[in-house]
Image (tube, helix red, strand yellow):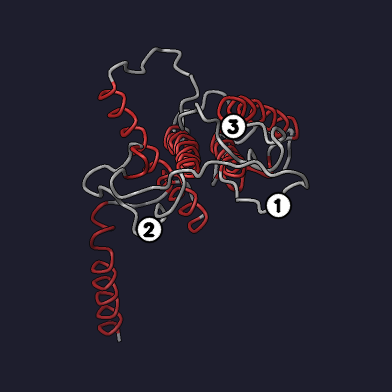
């Protein structure tokens, strides 16, 4: 595509897509099994593991009606640091998912910075000029650097591999200290309620963003370009059958 042409009007959609993919690579990491360095081995106290008495070590998120939802039994025998790392990844992806879902909805009708013919977000990524790619990469890198410095241990510290992909001991998942409007409640009960709301909205945002991208990939249209109505979603099969029968009767009468 012509990079000198005006950028397509859905630029924030691929931007949020790229950010989501980059944060996914940065925050959802795999455990590395690397042989420790030669030398004396320090004794490390065994870390407590999860139990049914304290679901997910007291982290918010077991919200009604699902409650203590762990059908795959992932928490059984899992250490506190690992559960905290999972929650950090969930919150990171949830926040990006909320931004991405909002971008899909808003940019269809409001895009003051860019204007073009639009179309699915995945088709716009190759049309971005190199300067935009550089700025997006720089912005993502700055955000990720600040987040890693806030919550993650230095992987090069220590005598072995114990600090690789490990959160700091005094870091609470998701608490980046970013509250410019002073919205964080001081009451513990109100804070927990706000954390549960963020988790619920983040989980919904991830599903919504994935749904938007899947729908665009399958149909080749954005959500506002779809000719969809509620009755069609519920009774689409019935109407299709009725239309086929009417067309068949009309063809038979014409003969």
Q: Few, some or many C-alpha atoms within 10 Å of disc 3 (few <14, some 14-19, many ≥20)?
A: some
Q: Nearer the viewer, mark 2 or mark 1?
A: 1
Q: Are marks 2 and 1 in contact (CB under 8 Å)?
A: no
Quarter residue 186 falls in: top left
First reached walking from the N terminus: tag 2 or tag 1: 1
Residue 246 percent across, percent down from the top left: 25, 74
Q: Residue at x 43, y 34 (%)?
A: 102
First reached walking from the N terminus: tag 2 or tag 3: 2
Q: Residue at x 55, y 34 (%)?
A: 167
The residue lying toward the viewer, choosing from 61 and 113, is 61
Q: Is residue 219 left or right of residue 113?
A: left
Seen in the picture, residue 196 relative to 225 is either above or below; the reply is above
Q: CA distance from mark 1 to mark 3?
A: 19 Å
Residue 219 percent across, percent down from the top left: 48, 57
What residue is disc 2 on? 73
What residue is disc 3 on? 152
Instruction: Check the picture and name the quadrant holding the N terminus.
Output: top right
Q: Residue at x 39, y 55 (%)?
A: 76
What residue is disc 1 on? 34
Q: CA distance from mark 2 to mark 3?
A: 26 Å
Q: Residue at x 27, y 58 (%)?
A: 232
Residue 142 percent across, percent down from the top left: 65, 25
């Amino acid at each position: 595509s012509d990079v000198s042409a005006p950028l397509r009007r859905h630029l924030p959609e691929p931007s949020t897509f790229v950010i989501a993919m980059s944060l996914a690579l940065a925050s959802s990491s795999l455990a590395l099994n690397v042989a420790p360095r030669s030398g004396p081995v320090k004794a490390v106290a065994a870390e407590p593991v999860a139990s049914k008495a304290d679901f997910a070590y007291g982290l918010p998120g077991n919200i009604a009606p699902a409650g203590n939802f762990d059908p795959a039994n992932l928490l059984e025998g899992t250490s506190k640091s690992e559960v905290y790392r999972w929650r950090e990844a969930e919150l990171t992806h949830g926040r990006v998912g909320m931004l991405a879902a909002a971008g899909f909805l808003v940019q269809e009708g409001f895009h003051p910075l860019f204007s073009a013919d639009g179309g699915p977000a995945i088709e716009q990524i190759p049309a971005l000029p190199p300067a935009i790619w550089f700025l997006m990469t720089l912005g993502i890198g700055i955000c990720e650097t600040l987040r890693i410095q806030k919550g993650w241990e230095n992987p090069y510290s220590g005598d072995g591999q114990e600090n690789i992909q490990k959160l700091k001991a005094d870091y609470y998942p998701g608490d980046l200290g970013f509250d410019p409007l002073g919205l964080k409640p001081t009451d513990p009960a109100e804070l927990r309620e706000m954390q549960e709301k963020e988790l619920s909205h983040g989980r919904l945002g991830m599903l919504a963003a994935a749904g938007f991208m899947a729908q665009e990939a399958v149909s080749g249209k954005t959500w506002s370009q779809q000719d969809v109505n509620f009755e069609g979603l519920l009774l689409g099969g019935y109407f299709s059958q009725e239309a086929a029968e009417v067309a068949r009767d009309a063809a038979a009468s014409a003969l």
